[in-house]
């Protein structure tokens, strides 16, 4: 008996050390593995539908992996091309600023906020309208080591690209070998944690799928509504702004970044009223979507209370980064399932 207990302890220690060593080895690739898992769980019904159409698992895995890659990379390429085109305008503006200065626009003194308009007009006249002051300002900007910042941004982009490549590769194997992995996972979980492990896993998967659907669907809806608002307000490139809004609306506080830029473009065109109306309308849309529609859509599938959804989304984002948007609600769903299981009254003998 004592020897058997020592063997169990030895196996547990060995298993723990092996798991920790594996996590340490894969630490650079854990974000890619996590993203692949989230995407696989969210799109698994599509995979099952293709299998029912008698498409081979390997072909299904290739098609879905390529589709996900195109869905992620395509919008980023379109935005990069558009930004590259707009960068030429920025370069020309900077060159003119250093040579002749930049005159104070008519809308600056007309800012309806007391004192702000007058102060901003005076600052603009002293630092941007005068060519010598503009050159000095540009020199100060260069002293901030913008070239180093640009190189760091390029290195970060390369790192993100590598993560994306491993995500797509992992996603292919998840689609191809998913049923076998799911079967093995159920057997191991049942041996380690008992019959309740499968139910907890199902709760987590439902939470991930509902979170992905809630974030994506609500984000697309925000992009469509605010895209129409951009057209009405007269924003330049409203389709591009609407597309960027829908893309960034999947992340909390992502949509405001886009519509604030759109408001500034209206201000630069001396259209203060349109900018103010657009700002308040877009703020109301984003507030309702992020605090009511999105949690309600997620909660309808996961049976999570409103507060737990908000805590899972924002707490997961704070703790794990962007992937935490999906991991957070999954953890909350598993914890709540354990709580409900423990709170059930025991049957009397």
Image (tube, rainbow, N blue to C red):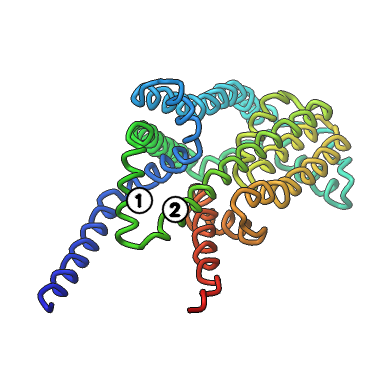
- Return the residue found at the far left: 3
* Badge number at residue 186: 1
Where the N terminus falls, by quadrant? bottom left
* Residue 191 location, quadrant: bottom left
On the picture, is 104 further left or further right than 215?
A: right
Q: Position of residue 151 (x, y in %)?
A: 42, 37
* Badge number at residue 35: none
* Residue 74 visible to the viewer: yes
Q: Name the element at disc 2.
A: helix
Could you tell me which residue is drawn at 54 percent across and 63 percent down?
Answer: 336
- Residue toward you, 76 or 269: 76
On the picture, is 27 further left or further right than 299?
A: left
Q: Position of residue 276 (x, y in %)?
A: 84, 41
- Residue toward you, 213 or 68: 213
* Residue 261 location, quadrant: top right
Q: CA distance from mark 1 to mark 2?
A: 9 Å
Q: Position of residue 134 (x, y in %)?
A: 66, 37
**Residue denoted by label 2:** 201
Whether tag 1 and tag 2 are in contact, CB under 8 A, the answer is: yes
Judge the density around disc 2: few (<14), some (14-19), many (≥20) Cα neighbours within 10 Å.
some
On the picture, is 190 further left or further right than 150?
A: left
Could you tell me which residue is drawn at 18 percent across and 63 percent down?
Answer: 14
* Residue 281 location, quadrant: top right
Q: Nearer the viewer, mark 1 or mark 2?
A: 1
- Residue toward you, 312 or 336: 336
* Residue 136 visible to the viewer: no
Q: Earlier in the sequence, mark 1 or mark 2?
A: 1
Judge the density around disc 1: few (<14), some (14-19), many (≥20) Cα neighbours within 10 Å.
some
Could you tell me which residue is drawn at 66 percent across and 51 percent down?
Answer: 295
Q: Name the element at disc 1.
A: helix
């Amino acid at each position: 008996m004592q020897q058997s207990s020592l063997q169990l302890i030895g196996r547990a220690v060995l298993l723990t050390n092996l798991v920790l060593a594996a996590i340490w080895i894969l630490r650079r690739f854990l974000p890619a593995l996590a993203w692949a898992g989230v995407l696989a769980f969210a799109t698994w019904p599509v995979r099952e539908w293709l299998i029912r159409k008698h498409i081979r698992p390997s072909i299904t895995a290739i098609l879905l992996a390529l589709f996900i890659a195109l869905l992620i990379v395509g919008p980023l390429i379109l935005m990069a091309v558009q930004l590259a085109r707009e960068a030429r305008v920025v370069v020309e503006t900077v060159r003119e600023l250093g040579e002749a200065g930049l005159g104070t626009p008519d809308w600056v003194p007309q800012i309806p906020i007391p004192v702000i308009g007058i102060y901003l007009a005076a600052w603009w006249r002293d630092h941007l309208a005068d060519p010598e002051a503009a050159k000095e300002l540009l020199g100060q900007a260069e002293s901030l080591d913008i070239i180093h910042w640009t190189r760091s941004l390029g290195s970060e982009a390369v790192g993100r690209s590598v993560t994306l490549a491993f995500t797509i590769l992992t996603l292919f194997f998840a689609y191809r070998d998913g049923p076998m992995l799911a079967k093995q996972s159920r057997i191991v979980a049942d041996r380690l944690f008992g019959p309740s492990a499968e139910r907890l896993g199902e709760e987590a998967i439902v939470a991930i799928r509902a979170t992905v659907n809630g974030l994506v669907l609500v984000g697309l809806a925000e992009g469509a509504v605010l895209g129409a608002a951009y057209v009405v307000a007269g924003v330049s490139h409203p389709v591009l702004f609407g597309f960027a809004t829908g893309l960034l609306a999947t992340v909390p506080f992502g949509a405001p970044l886009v519509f604030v830029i759109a408001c500034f473009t209206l201000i630069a065109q001396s259209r203060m009223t349109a900018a103010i109306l657009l700002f308040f309308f877009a703020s109301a849309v984003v507030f309702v979507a992020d605090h009511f529609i999105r949690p309600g859509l997620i909660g309808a599938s996961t049976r999570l209370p409103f507060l737990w959804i908000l805590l899972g989304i924002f707490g997961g984002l704070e703790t794990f980064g962007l992937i935490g948007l999906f991991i957070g609600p999954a953890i909350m769903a598993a914890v709540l399932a354990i709580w409900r299981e423990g709170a059930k009254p025991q049957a009397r003998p």
